[in-house]
Image (tube, helix red, strand yellow):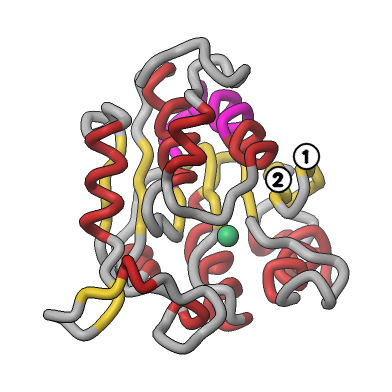
Amino acid sequence: MSRGQGGGGGLDLARVLAVKGFLSAAEALHLHRVGREAARRGPCLEVGSYCGRSAVCLGAACAELGQVLFSIDHHRGSEEQQPGEEYFDPALYDPRRGGIDTLPWFRDTLRAAGLEETVVPIVCDSRLAARAWRTPLALVFIDGGHARESVLADYESWSPHLVPGGLLLFHDVFEDPARGGQAPYEVVRLALASGRFREHSRVESLAVLAHTGASAAAGEALRK
Ligand code: MG
């Protein structure tokens, strides 16, 4: 990927925004910035690849530091992206399969951005991948299914793998219910209340928390 364009250091912002997705320009730049901060310390992981807009931001950061990004998605679209729903995109509908398939788009994005040697696509439900996960992570970005059950499962599955000081990110965090669903905001509040995370930074609906180093067991004790 070319460097020095769009004011994002190693991020080509025009290329990022040409990829289908829901991350704003300011959020994309911040994702790249915190990705660089985290990738000095270890591999990064995102839940919710979609067509690869965020993978280009985090992937560019990982590539700059010789690190790896794992990107998990079943690529069948989340609840609100199905036919008839608010975020349905007919271009992503595969008539042969009779459903959404974002994997070919994601692969095209990685190839065009020169990130095939940096990003590891994992094609399954995130909970399945978590069942056998053992690798400590420096950053976890949760932007998969936005139902409360999905956001909570992703938080519970992946946040225990963060190294102390590691970064936990959520997209689509809205304090005001009129602006969007409340599940990511509720889980952010849960994470902060656990004592395991503190606020790190915030750009629009992208919330970044930092692991305090407290264990999950200590977090449970604090909640009592
Ligand atoms: Mg999102």
Q: Position of residue 156 (x, y in %)?
A: 56, 68
Q: Quadrant of residue 93?
A: bottom left
Q: Residue at x 79, y 56 (%)?
A: 195
Q: How far is the residue under mark 1 from the one under mark 2?
A: 5 Å
Left or right: 23 in relation to 190: left
Q: Nearer the viewer, residue 23 or 143?
A: 23
Left or right: 3 in relation to 26: left
Residue extent of the magenta highlight:
32-45
* Image mark for residue 200: 1
Q: Position of residue 102 (x, y in %)?
A: 30, 63
Q: Is residue 110 above or below residue 176?
A: above
Q: Is residue 180 visible?
A: yes
Q: Nearer the viewer, residue 218 or 183?
A: 183
Identify the residue at the far left of this view. 96
Give the class, few, some or many, for how many residues have Cα within 10 Å of label 2's Cα (few <14, many ≥20).
Answer: many
Query: Which type of secondary structure does the marked residue at label 1 adopt?
Result: strand
Q: Position of residue 220 (x, y in %)?
A: 73, 69
Q: Which quadrant, please, contains the C terminus?
A: bottom right
* Magenta region includes residue 143: no
Asked if the residue under mark 2 is in contact with the one under mark 1, i.e. CB atoms within 8 Å, the reply is yes
Give the class, few, some or many, for how many residues have Cα within 10 Å of label 1's Cα (few <14, many ≥20).
Answer: some
Q: Residue at x 66, y 64 (%)?
A: 217
| Amino acid on which disc 1 is placed | His
In the image, is the residue at mark 2 within 8 Å of ligand 1 by its beta carbon? no
Q: Is residue 128 visible?
A: no
Q: Is residue 40 above or below residue 179?
A: above
Identify the residue at the far bottom of this view. 84
| Amino acid on which disc 2 is placed | Val
Query: Which type of secondary structure does the marked residue at label 2 adopt?
Result: strand
* Image mark for residue 208: 2
Q: Nearer the viewer, residue 210 or 81?
A: 81
